Amino acid sequence: MVRFENVGLRYGNGPEVLRDLSFELAPGSFQFLTGPTGAGKSSLLKLLYLSERPSRGLITLFGEQLSKVPRAKLPDLRRRIGVVFQDFRLLDHMTVFDNVALPLRIAGHGEKHVREGVGDLLAWVGLADKLHALPPTLSGGQKQLVAIARAVINSPQLIVADEPTGNIDRDMSLKIMRLFIELNKQGTTVVVATHDWGLIDRMKRPMLELFEGKLAEASWWLKPGEPLEPAPV
């Protein structure tokens, strides 16, 4: 699904913010990305969702080496990636339904398909009664659920989430993580950036740790027989 080979990233003429990153993510895997503030987590995510290109090294995504992909083909690759931001990035003048429907409409789907798909997905995330609400009327947790629904409405192969639980309470954080786990069980590759070590420990998923732009040797996997679900609250 994803391969980084000696990847580095700098902005303009500044110093490298990411250095010598080499790792692979298997299809259908679930990975946490962590590290202190300024370690380079957001920069790494930008490389994953094709907002930035590396300054050096090779990135392979969906079997395509990005250095060989023509710029005109990048939108097609981006449509295979769902992105969830910490600050939600919802359009406040549009209803919950229209926010989630936007990717489908941009892709040219008919309104019948849009109505059915968006309605079913909002019911799945627990927002069936909020279809016509505007984002400013929602809680932080509800906004994040809308953002997740918008990110997955096109059935992406890869979901990238940047601190998705950073602005919400603990109970809602666990609900959102369970949604990501359910999506992962359906075959979606999931990468979640977080600085919440308690959440990482509770979820028992593998981890990539960044420190000063480099990858630390810190990762663990489920032990045989360990449950996939988060521990009880």
Image: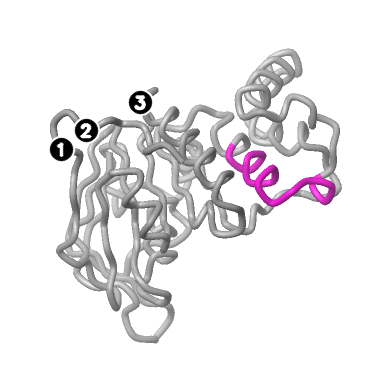
Residue at disc 3, secondary structure:
loop
Report x, y in % for residue 24.
20, 47
Instruction: Return the disc, 3 or 1, that comes first in the chain's sequence.
Output: 3
Report x, y in % for residue 142.
69, 42
Q: Please give the residue where the numbered disc 1 appears in the rendered image.
A: 223
Q: Is residue 85 left or right of residue 118?
A: left
Report x, y in % for residue 109.
67, 22
Mark 2 surroundings within 10 Å by alpha-carbon count, few (fewer than 14), some (14 through 19), many (20 or more): few
Q: Which residues are magenta?
A: 135-148
Instruction: Return the disc, 2 or 3, that comes first in the chain's sequence.
Output: 3
Residue at disc 1, secondary structure:
loop
Q: Is residue 52 left or right of residue 7?
A: right
The residue lying toward the viewer, choosing from 117 and 15, is: 117
Q: CA distance from mark 2 to mark 3?
A: 19 Å
Report x, y in % for residue 203.
35, 43
Residue 14 among those drawn in magenta: no
Residue at 36% over, 60% down: 197
The residue lying toward the viewer, choosing from 221 and 85, is: 221
The kind of residue tagged 2 is Glu
Residue 226 tag number: 2
Q: Please give the residue where the numbered disc 3 appears in the rendered image.
A: 187
In this rendering, which labeled residue sits more in front, label 3 or label 1? 1
Q: Is residue 17 left or right of residue 22?
A: right
Which quadrant holds the N terminus? top left
Give the quarter of the image for residue 148. top right
